[in-house]
Image (cartoon, helix red, strand yellow):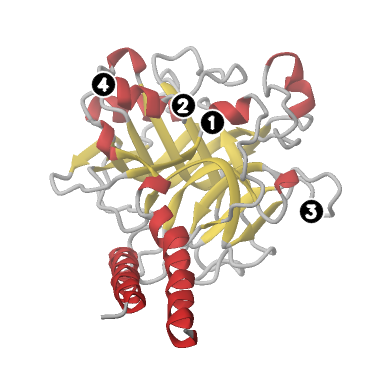
Amino acid sequence: MPLSFVYVSHLSALLFFSHGIRAVQSASVNKQEQSYCYRNNGHGDFLYNEGSGLAGFNFVPNAEGNGTVYLIGDVVKVLEGRMPVGTETRKWSAKRIIGFGAGAVGRISGLGEAFYANGMAHVRSTDNQSEIYFQTIRDSKFLTPFSMFVSEVSVPDGLATYKTPERWNPLTPDYTLLSLYRNIYRAVHTAPFCFHGLIKFSQLEGIAVSKAPIYEEPLFGNNAQGYYTKPPFRIPFAEAFVFGCAANFSRIRDPILRTKLSRALYVNPLDPGSASELLVHSHGLTVMPCGSAMSGRNWGRGEEGPGEVYHLQTNSRIKELSVKVFKINHADKLQEFMANGYIFTTVLSPCLKLISFFMIFVQFTF
């Protein structure tokens, strides 16, 4: 048997194997496209669940939860204003994921607050040389030095809901985003967690960087005024799709999980809730109600979309919510995204194709 034929046969087998992995991955996340509209139209994932009707906080656990949270990069690098090699050229797909991060659409010079949902990366641009400076732009591809997300088809470990009591007592403290974090933390028995879902705010409190953290200048400290040149946002009666994560590092015994989570959660000196026992991180993307001109199946698919991205403050006041919760109770539940098949299917597979074609060419040439 010619040696070249042996090479081609083995390479073809590897090529077939890589296609098989990609097909399995594609099948595992293939799902009907969803809408941001929150009338119950059968899609389920991005919809507001008003079914319980119960006032106060409620949590319904799900024993069949199978969600894995994925991580790209390191938020510490962002806070230090340092870009890892390759960040400005490596593009990622926003298809079938829900999450947040520091992202850019187009050039890395626009790196800002990002939210991933509905197959799009929604990014508040920090490129002050463009006409869309400090506006939220969208694309299916994005650049990022740090992102955290789940698959949109992941089964959650529980559903958390909250509704303000109809008979409101003025002496009752406001139910805030920090209140939600603490309630979920107790409901999942102090495990780290992430959640996503629609929240109706009586007042949304948010901030957003206005300069890309790519010039090796730390985000906080003496440089904070240069990064946060726009005043904080205070938006009454806002509704937003939210992705957030939290952990109490004093309760984490697994050093691997602690290290992974330290790449996503940090103390934010600009957040009034930063003194909490929990380290939290959440972004929100404002949405439109059903029946509005901008809502519907193709919402957010063009630059004219209504949503704006915010880094949410923990003192945001909540009126009503329904969110899916994903526990990160061991290190395997928080995975490096590149280690989850990305390298093989997007890097090795094309290389194997080239090698295979080259060997076929050699065989027929000589």
- Which of these two is toward me, 284 or 50? 284
Q: Is residue 325 above or below residue 289?
A: above
Label 3's element?
A: loop
Q: Earlier in the sequence, mark 3 or mark 1?
A: 1
- Callout 1 crowding tier (Cα within 10 Å): few <14, some 14–19, many ≥20: many
Asked if disc 2 and disc 1 are in contact, CB closer than 8 Å, the reply is yes
Q: Which residue is mark 4?
A: 254
Which label sits on residue 75?
1
Q: Which residue is mark 2?
A: 265
Q: Is residue 177 above or below residue 120?
A: above
Q: Earlier in the sequence, mark 4 or mark 2?
A: 4
Q: Earlier in the sequence, mark 1 or mark 4?
A: 1
Could you tell me residue 349's position as x and y percent? 42, 65
Q: Is residue 293 left or right of residue 125?
A: left
Q: Looking at the image, is mark 4 or mark 2 nearer the viewer?
A: 4
Label 4's element?
A: loop
Which label sits on residue 132?
3
